[in-house]
Amino acid sequence: MSGATLLKETGPREVFCGLTSIVWLHRRMPDAFFLVVGSRTCAHLIQSAAGVMIFAEPRFGTAILEERDLAGLADAHDELDRVVNNLLERRPEIRTLFLVGSCPSEVIKIDLSRVAEKLNHQLKGKVRVVNYSGSGIETTFTQGEDGALKALVPLMPPSENSQLLLVGTLANAVEDRLITIFKRLGIEKITSFPPRQSTELPSVGPGTKVLLTQPYLTDTARALRDKGAEIIKAPFPLGVEGSRLWIEAAANSFGVDNSLVQTTLEPLIIRARKAIKPYKEILNGKKLFLLPESQLEIPLARFLYMECGMELVEIGTPYLNREMMDPEINLLPENTRIVEGQHVEKQLDRVREKHPDLVVCGMGLANPLEAEGISTKWSIEMVFSPIHGIDQASDLAELFARPLKRHDLLSSKQFAKF
Ligand code: SF4
């Protein structure tokens, strides 16, 4: 085990809420609809994060809680029933309806599980209604996906068959490439969760081996384990090394011959290392500070240290699941400072004191830091970019090299003026 220094911090936080994950989940499952039960603020957040679709009917919306609901003057449950029935009448193509809780719906204690149960009874299987929380109370934005997937686990059919289950949303093209690799290794049955159609939920049971593609699916992993699945322990598939170890862990658990794994991966690894090289020249030796937001911070730091030569000043993470993160933490250098939780003011003080070359942070903190001359990278970009797998490693490195290049260009232009 690496000798990383693990610390905890509490205080004011600066993160997006779980509603944000609707943006990638609704693209993944086009037959599903996400109905946020929330305020106008929630509606604005989700609309500006997802953009307004002009040519297609949106697959998300907000049932807005008005002042009468918030003051308890109207029965919000009845109002919600009415909104859902109108929606389903108008949009008969919806197969799964996610009722997504928010801060306001939780504060006034709307019981969405009761609403979902009632609607499921009424709809008699024509549409499946599930509920989860996307609220920003003490949560971060990637937990929205964890909540949505956990809500689907009880609906997965049982199976004893041997299969590899990839868990976590990936870009379809990236997922196809990873599946092709596993097929070449002789793993025959590979399914993914969430599926590309919400009605095609994969099965789960004692023969299922779960390979997590994202590090923020703690509750989903626990629910799958409760269904008898085995969770494969591995680093996450970011960068050449993380992806190699991730694929090897799955191959080992299926008894695939190691020499077949090596010969399959070798050409991909050679190509990817060559592609990373120009970005490594920019990143090598630069100081990196990651503020907590996406829960991808530890795997990203490991990649940027191991494969791009960056120096890790501090890795912030909103939550630390030791069991899931140990394979990552073991790859970090001695005395790496990992801080779980956030006290944003204190963290910003440390950023200013250490003056790193690059800070990975939320959008709200990026502009002020840029104004102070510190280069930044939005952590939310990592969940919208196809960054997983060996083939994507150079694109991942490029995402971090870009702000440093821009910073250099701007500095040289300023010098040219004088
Ligand atoms: S769920 Fe909470 S944090 Fe998210 S937009 Fe609504 S009110 Fe804001």
Image (tube, rainbow, N blue to C red):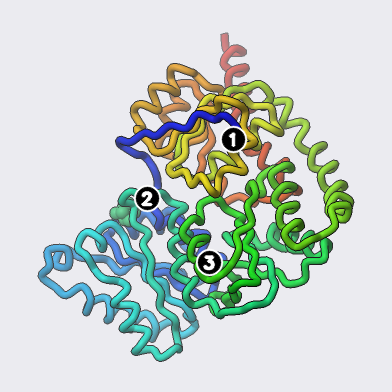
Residue shown at 60% from the left, 18% from the top: 413
Of the pair 145 and 78, the residue shown nearer to us: 145
Q: Are marks 3 and 1 in contact (CB under 8 Å)?
A: no
Q: Residues within 10 Å of mark 2 (few under 14, many from 20)?
A: some
Examine the image and state in which quarter residue 9 appears: top left
Label 2 C-beta lies within 8 Å of the nearest ligand 1 atom: no
Between the C-alphas of marks 3 and 1, the distance is 28 Å
Q: Position of residue 41 (x, y in %)?
A: 30, 55
Q: Relative to 414, is 9 above or below?
A: below
> Which residue occupies 36% across, 62% down?
133
Q: Are marks 3 and 2 in contact (CB under 8 Å)?
A: no
Which kind of residue does numbered mark 1 sit on? Ala
The amino acid pointed to by label 2 is Thr
CA distance separating discs 3 and 2: 21 Å
Q: Is residue 88 visible?
A: yes
Image quadrant containing the C terminus? top right
Checking the image for residue 139, the label placed there is 2
Callout in the foreground (3, 1): 3
Which sits earlier in the primary sequence, circle 3 or circle 2?
Answer: 2
What's the mark number on residue 224? 3
Q: Position of residue 190 (x, y in %)?
A: 70, 69
Q: Is disc 2 placed on a helix, strand or loop?
A: loop
Nearer the N terminus, badge 3 or badge 1? 3
Residue 387 in view (yes/no)? no
- How far across and down, in percent of the image, does residue 81 sit? 28, 80
The residue identified by callout 1 is 301
Quadrant of the displayed image that contains ligand 1: bottom left
Hey, what amino acid is under mark 3?
A: Leu
Q: Is residue 147 left or right of residue 301?
A: left
Q: Could you give the CA–CA distance between mark 1 and mark 2, rounded to whole angstroms?
A: 22 Å
Do callouts 1 and 2 mark residues in contact (Cβ within 8 Å)? no
